[in-house]
């Protein structure tokens, strides 16, 4: 199969240099805002309905083990405090009205505004997610290129075996394995927390934070390496078999010079798309990784909210995650348009 390669720097088919029109940018941003608003409305309605159908009693979950000794009068007071005794349509309308004004409600677990809890916990998770995202992208792309350049060799088979093994490995299993080996047996990293036990988090140094970040970030990045590696290898092998590369070989171009000038740019397009699309998988994986390492981030807050029936916090996290994943996908789309000169960055609505 012939491979349509991207134009190389200095080639005759240079990308157009005209800047995108202001109208095209406005249309581009406007369409995506409309899509995002519609998506948020759907997620909000579906999430609220699912919370209503959940078998977990929020009052029992909030009180915990003392729920069996809770009287009807006390139960009624708690329900009135959190507005749980109101009809479902009324609670939905009140929640939606507050949401429009930026008020996501109050978390019953943390007894604080949902926006405050999400902001505080996401700051802790941001370093973890960003580190894992960068490591998985860079290492996956490099391993994919190495496997393609040495295809058929022992190194290529080893990299593919490594990627297939990681692709089928659950995040919590990888985390437990690394925790046992690296933290318990070798003692190279702490077993839990984002800062040393007993130390005020505000007083922790950057080195201490990085030391505690090492294992959770390694767990997430190891799991995310596999798809990037396999897709990059497949694309690079396809490019290496194209007529353009065969002609370059005939001119004496070979080795890593050939990979760098003829393959990297073409293989980067699917890798970028996949990397930005993996944000949703990183968010899901962070829930398990933060539980394994007792890391106080947004993933751990999600688990606590689910176990203790914290409906406002669960709905707020669902909406926040929706925005984060949608923005990540759109950034991947824009990155692909920037790398591929055949596709205009802002096309005014031609491409979805």
Image (cartoon, helix red, strand yellow):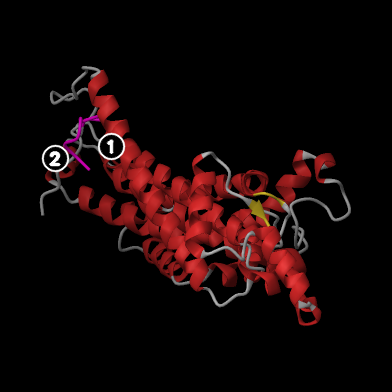
Disc number lying in front (2 or 1):
1
**Residue at image point 37% right, 61% down:** 156
**Labels 2 & 1 near each other (Cβ < 8 A):** no
**As drawn, is 40 to the left or to the right of 309?**
left
Q: Main secondary structure of the magenta part?
A: loop
**As drawn, is 41 to the left or to the right of 198?**
left
Residue 199, percent across and down?
Answer: 87, 49
**Residue at image point 53% right, 73% down:** 54
**Residue at image point 55% right, 54% down:** 317
Q: Check disc 1: other Cα within 10 Å, few if <14, some if 14-19, many if 20+.
A: few
Question: Which residue is nearer to you in this view: 1 or 99?
Answer: 99
Quadrant of res 147? bottom left
Question: Which residue is nearer to you in this view: 53 or 341?
Answer: 53
**As drawn, is 247 to the left or to the right of 237?**
left
Residue 300, percent across and down?
Answer: 65, 60
Residue tagged 2 = 247
> Could one spot residue 134 in this view of the protein?
no
Residue tagged 1 = 31
Distance between mark 2 and mark 1 Cα atoms? 43 Å
Circle 2 SS class: helix
**Residue at image point 60% right, 56% down:** 313
Q: Does the magenta stretch include residue 260?
A: no
- The correct choice, above or below, for 234 with respect to 172 in the image is above
> Could one spot residue 65 in this view of the protein?
yes
Q: Does the magenta stretch include residue 348?
A: yes
Circle 1 SS class: helix
**As drawn, is 49 to the left or to the right of 258?**
right
Q: Where's the C terminus, which quadrant? A: top left
Q: Check disc 2: other Cα within 10 Å, few if <14, some if 14-19, many if 20+.
A: few
Residue furthest to the bottom: 68
Residue furthest to the right: 198
């Amino acid at each position: 199969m012939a491979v349509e390669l991207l134009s190389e720097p200095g080639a005759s088919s240079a990308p157009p240099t005209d800047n995108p029109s202001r109208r095209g940018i406005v249309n581009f941003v406007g369409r995506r805002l409309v899509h995002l608003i519609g998506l948020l409305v759907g997620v909000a309605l579906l999430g609220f309905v699912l919370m209503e159908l959940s078998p977990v009693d929020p009052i029992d979950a909030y009180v915990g083990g003392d729920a069996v000794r809770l009287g009807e009068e006390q139960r009624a007071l708690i329900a009135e405090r959190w507005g749980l005794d109101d009809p479902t349509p009324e609670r939905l309308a009140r929640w939606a009205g507050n949401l429009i004004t930026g008020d996501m409600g109050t978390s019953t677990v943390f007894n604080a505004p949902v926006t405050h809890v999400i902001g505080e916990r996401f700051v802790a998770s941001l370093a973890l997610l960003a580190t894992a995202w960068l490591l998985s992208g860079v290492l996956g792309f490099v391993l994919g290129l190495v496997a393609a350049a040495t295809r058929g060799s022992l190194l290529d088979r080893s990299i593919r075996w490594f990627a297939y093994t990681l692709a089928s490995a659950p995040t919590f299993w990888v985390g437990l394995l690394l925790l046992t080996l690296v933290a318990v047996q070798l003692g190279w990293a702490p077993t839990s927390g984002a800062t040393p036990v007993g130390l005020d988090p505000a007083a922790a140094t950057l080195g201490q934070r990085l030391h505690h970040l090492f294992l959770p970030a390694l767990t997430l990045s190891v799991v995310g390496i596999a798809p990037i590696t396999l897709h990059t290898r497949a694309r690079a092998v396809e490019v290496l078999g194209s007529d353009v590369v065969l002609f370059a070989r005939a001119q004496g171009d070979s080795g890593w010079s050939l990979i760098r000038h003829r393959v990297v740019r073409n293989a980067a397009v699917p890798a970028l798309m996949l990397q930005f699309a993996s944000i949703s998988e990183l968010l899901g994986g962070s829930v398990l990784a933060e539980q394994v390492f007792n890391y106080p981030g947004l993933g751990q807050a999600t688990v606590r909210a689910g176990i203790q029936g914290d409906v406002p916090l669960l709905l707020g996290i669902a909406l926040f995650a929706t925005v984060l994943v949608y923005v990540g996908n759109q950034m991947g789309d824009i990155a692909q348009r920037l790398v591929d000169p055949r596709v205009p960055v802002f096309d005014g609505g031609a491409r979805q």
